[in-house]
Amino acid sequence: MRRSGGQLLTLFSWLAAAFLALVCAGLVIFLVARGWGGLGAGFLFGDGPVWSALAGRRPVFDGIWPSVVGTLQLVAGASLLALPVGILTGIHLSEHPQRPPGRVLRLAVDVLAGVPSIIMGLFGFGMILVLRHTFFKQANTGLLPAMICLALLVLPYLARTTENALQALPESLRLAGPSLGLTTGQSLRRILLPAARPGILSGVLLAVGRVAEDTAVILMTGAVANSGLPGSLTGKFQALPFDIYYLAAEHRGPEDLVRAFATALLLLGLTTALLVAARLILRGMDRREGWNR
Amino acid sequence: MSFFTRFRFETAAAWLTAAAVGAVLLFLLFSVWPLLVSGEILGTLRGGWRPFAAEPSYGIGPMVLVSLLMAGGAVLLAFPLAVGVAMFIHGTGSRRLRGPVQALVAFLTGVPTVVYGFVAVILLVPMMRHLDAGTTGYGLLPAILTLALLILPTMILVLDARLGRQDRLWMQTGLALGMSPGQTLQHVLLPQARGGLVTAMVLGLNRALGDTLVALMVAGNAARLPEGFLDSVRSLTAHIALVLATDTFSPEYRSVAAAALVLFLLTSGLTLGIRYLASSGESA
């Protein structure tokens, strides 16, 4: 009886793994089959000369170039805001865990990591309302509020990956600094941070992927379907994930649908590339130093 | 006192992060405050959503229930599969396939939520329409199925990490005692990793509760109690996304804020629960 139980479990685990492989293959094949034909210069820039679109001299309505630019701007802005604070928070969590506020701060990071992105979006939207009713009447949703909310969203990821990267360093490396007479700060800057750089960098790449794929936040803070290239930090903007969401509900013909498939394929390619890069960096570190594991 | 005398950038940054959490919570409380003061909050939590009726009601009762139903259903479906795949990676599967399966799991964690939603709209919704010709195809069941797929890789990652810590030693011991890999997993490894199982479940639940796009795109968004699995429903997250776009602090806005507060308290509570579990597990 027991033996057959074990065999049943083995059979089930094979079925589960096969199901997983089937889902992956199905997803990729489906997207490629329906979206591959839609990829091309026209997909990005619409009909017309590519260079004028790249330079921003020609508005692009039938291509997704404005969304690509919008997503890149979101990534750049949110990274600029979140990277310093997130990485420094991670350093604090790892290097001063024993201080009394340490426990509170770690709790805050954990809670922040669990906050759904739609709440971050609502937070941004609500803050704009508050501003509008107090001392800044023109406050409106747009690129900058979206960047700030996305930065809040990835802050805890950055803090955690930085903390983990520092914690994974061997004890001998931690002792090297003080034994050479370095201060805590010098040891951190000259020894620990350089050694933890691959781990921190891979965390940054994952955070970038999170910014690029999140839809709920920008849904609430100013993403629209047809704004063209964003004119300023306060302007409305387009973004890749929002385009997919919009086209899924509002496609009016087969060409719209092909565009949605191609956009989904592009976004999936982008996030997968970031994931692979993060893994390669980590693996490179493993091979070079032989620390982790 | 050294805390006040020595300024550190990293400490300042950590406090800034903590302030962000505080700001979000304060903002939600501030938005819901009128409901709390007048005692309407209970009615809002239980009542239905009828903003255009002669006696308008801005309740979120159906959405609370639907969110719990959706997330719970997704976890129930995904959890056995996650355990199965984790077992495959840690013993019952072939050694040669272990790496590729782990790579597939990593790949799935990177798939954007909106892509899951999009594929579900194109593939799953027509299937559902086929199942019952009277419906639109958007509803509770396709949302649960998609969410289950969404949280599956997250749960596998947690289990994989947990089992990976101890599997080789225990597995060898089990094999030496004449047990099969499946039996060793069933009787030794999985009971050992009970904390990991619970963590995986709770993280999956959290992710499913907080997800907006799948619910918004696939569930149909009718703000009422479902009578069947194919009925159109609206989650808390979708409610927040749908009702906005008024530029005043209206009753609709307060209802949305109440939905967000419920969601915040649920997800934070689950997060704190896992933390408690982890800390009590380490000390034992």
Image (cartoon, coloured by chain):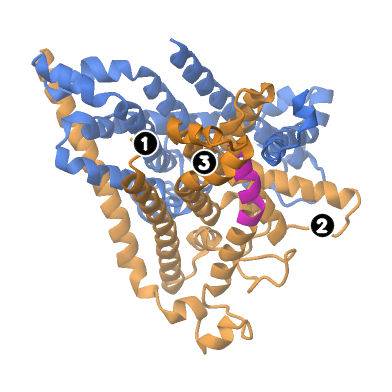
The earlier-in-sequence mark between 2 and 3 is: 2
- Residue A117 spot, x, y in % from top left: 59, 44
On whether disc 2 and disc 1 are found on a single subunit, the reply is no
Residue located beneath label 1 in the image: B157
Callout 3: few (<14), some (14-19), or many (20+) C-alpha neighbours within 10 Å? many
- Residue A200 spot, x, y in % from top left: 50, 46
Cα separation, mark 2 vs mark 3, equals 43 Å
Residue located beneath label 3 in the image: A192
Asked whether residue A182 is in view, the answer is yes
Task: Tell me the amino acid under the disc marked 2.
Answer: Ala
Q: From the image, state whether disc 1 or disc 3 is nearer to you.
A: 3
Q: Quadrant of the C terminus of chain A?
A: top left
Q: Is residue A8 left or right of residue B10?
A: left
Range of residues picked out in magenta: A79-90
The quadrant where residue B11 appears = top right
Disc number at residue A139?
2
Callout 1: few (<14), some (14-19), or many (20+) C-alpha neighbours within 10 Å? some
Secondary structure, mark 2, is: loop
Secondary structure, mark 3, is: helix
Cα separation, mark 2 vs mark 1, equals 42 Å
Q: Is residue A220 magenta?
A: no
Colour chosen for chain B: blue
Furthest residue toward bottom: A49
- Residue A255 spot, x, y in % from top left: 43, 74
Callout 2: few (<14), some (14-19), or many (20+) C-alpha neighbours within 10 Å? some
Q: Quadrant of the N terminus of chain A?
A: top left
